[in-house]
Amino acid sequence: VRTGLHSGFVIANPEQLLGRNVVLAARIASHAKGGEILVSSTLKEYTESDPSFSFTERGEFHFKGVLGEHVVYAVRWDLGGSG
């Protein structure tokens, strides 16, 4: 499983979610390797104060259909609190 995450407002209808933030999450996911979770810098900022998570920068990307450069991070988390 490859996962890409971003946080932001979306346009929702009964069949699907739409908008720039949905596209950005999908583009981030397309760069993930199997078993990897990649997140946007926005989501990293929201969660980096939680000591359960740690981040490794994966680089700055320009994604098709989304303006600008976006820094992407791989995330690791500790569910058991044992490091």
Image (cartoon, grey):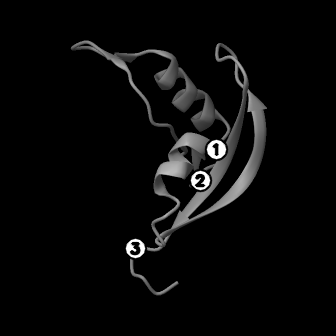
Looking at the image, is mark 1 or mark 3 earlier in the sequence?
1
Q: Position of residue 50 (x, y in %)?
A: 45, 66
Observer-side mark, 1 or 3, equals 3
Q: Is residue 44 above or below residue 80?
A: above
Residue of label 1: 32
Tell which of 82 and 15 is nearer to you: 82
Residue 79 got which mark? 3
Q: Position of residue 10 (x, y in %)?
A: 38, 21
Residue type at tag 3: Leu
Instruction: Classify residue 11 by image quadrant.
Output: top left
- Left or right: residue 35 versus residue 46 is right
Mark 3 surroundings within 10 Å by alpha-carbon count, few (fewer than 14), some (14 through 19), many (20 or more): few
Residue occupying image coordinates x 68% and y 38%: 31
Q: Are marks 2 and 3 in contact (CB under 8 Å)?
A: no
Q: Are marks 1 and 2 in contact (CB under 8 Å)?
A: yes
Q: Position of residue 41 (x, y in %)?
A: 61, 43
Residue occupying image coordinates x 57% and y 26%: 24
Q: Is residue 63 above or below residue 13?
A: below
